[in-house]
Image (cartoon, grey):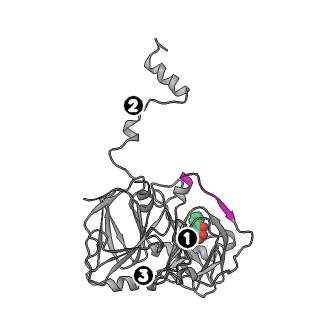
Amino acid sequence: MTNASDEEAYTRLAAEGAAPLWRYYGSLFLPEPKPTAVPIVWHYKALREVAMHFAESLSIEDAARRVLMLVNPGLQDPPATVNTLFSGIQILLPGEQAPAHRHTANAFRFVIEGSGVYTTVDGERLYMNPGDLLLTAGWKWHDHFHPGDNPMLWLDGLDYPLVNLLEAGFYEQGADRFQKSVVPDGISTRQFIHGRLNPVWLNSQERHSPLGSYPWVETERALAAIGDDADGCEHDGVSLEYTNPLDGGSVLPTIGCRVQRLRPGFVGRPRRQTSSVICHVVRGSGSTEVGGKTLEWQEKDVFVIPGWLAYQHRNGSRDEDAVLFTSSNEPVMKALNLYREEAV
Ligand code: 1HN
């Protein structure tokens, strides 16, 4: 190759299945992260109508899970809501059963409306009511049954975009369509209900919370106990993290969940962080500026804050609280020493 031109050398390099680093610096090493996901809101009112349509036209036998995927325009293949996380809205009608399966992806559900459904997670029945957070850590069997009498809708959250990127996805359908109840209903939640009195006979070394559910009554009680007596976080309001009571860590190894109360008239101080966040509006209305775009949100809507975009929350009401339920990949960023944040 001594007398060859550079052009010939580049062609030869490509033919050998290699590449010149000096031509890639600009795209491989950015001065700072540039998210592929875009800031966007999904409006619940419209999605609920579509969910109701498919609840009538598509049987649960055909769908298995009737989920409307919240696909970020920047992340269509594979479909994701933010870089490592997926969220969707699931509907189950009275009398329906979503059959048992398990996957290595971790999942949670946050109940939007209705009651009566129980999800069975590794043989434990967990009843679902509005505002409850339910966990299905990776590889646990889960099926959902609706013995009640009104449609039920909830927000699903999964880390499959990350699990698939890591090529660690396994999936299995249950040999039996539905699991038998093998422990008392809701026992995992009840035995940890106080939050600081842990059962000493349970010392799971698992990397996820031992609780199957975090009932809304407890969440509401925690917010009410604080009331207006503490300032809260200047960026995120009165922001409480759902924790693993055994180690104080996140509820799932790859997903952290919080509830955030933005007081009437709250205007957050802008900031950015490398983690990406999916926000669901439990109640109230307002707006969040994300990367220079203003996202207007109403009760039950979902919006996203992709990593490293500056965001600023505003409660649009002078009289009413706005309450958000948020899920993020902060535990992944922290575990890998990639978490950074700054006020902007
Ligand atoms: C899943 O298994 C459920 O079990 C919900 O309810 C949403 C989205 C993608 C892949 C699997 C469920 C899902 C999902």
- Locate the C terminus by quadrant: bottom left
Per the model, the C-alpha gap separating discs 3 and 2 is 53 Å
In the image, taking residue 209 as reference, residue 316 lies left or right, namely left
Q: CA distance from mark 3 to mark 1?
A: 24 Å
Task: Give the magenta-colored segment's residue range.
Answer: 164-172
Residue, x 43% and y 80% (percent of image)? 196
Label 3 amino acid?
Thr
Can residue 59 be seen by looking at this rendering? no
Give the residue at mark 3.
Answer: 219
What residue is rendered at 35% in x and 43% in y? 30
Residue 204's disc number: 1
Q: Does the beta carbon at disc 1 come under 8 Å from ligand 1?
A: no
* Mark 1: amino acid: Ser
The secondary structure type at the circle numbered 3 is: helix
Marks 2 and 1 sit apart, C-alpha to C-alpha, by 49 Å
The front one of 124 and 144 is 124
The image position of residue 83, as x and y in percent, is: 46, 56
Taking the view exactly as shown, the residue that stands out farthest to the front is 200
Label 2 Cα crowd, 10 Å radius (few <14 / some 14-19 / many 20+): few
Where ligand 1 lies, by image quadrant? bottom right
Residue nearest the viewer, comparing 114 with 133: 133
Q: Position of residue 318 (x, y in %)?
A: 25, 81
Q: Which of the marked residues, 3 or 1, is nearer the chain's N terminus?
A: 1
Depth order, front residue of 55/322 = 322
How many circles with numbers are drawn on the protein?
3
- The answer to whether residue 317 is left or right of residue 217 is left
Whether 265 is drawn above or below 13: the answer is below
Decide which of 229, 118 is in the foreground and name it: 229
Name the residue carrying label 2. 22
Coordinates of residue 159 in the picture (x, y in percent): 52, 61
Location of residue 55 with respect to 139 vertically, above or below = below
Within 10 angstroms of label 3, few (less than 14), some, or many (20 or more) residues? Answer: some
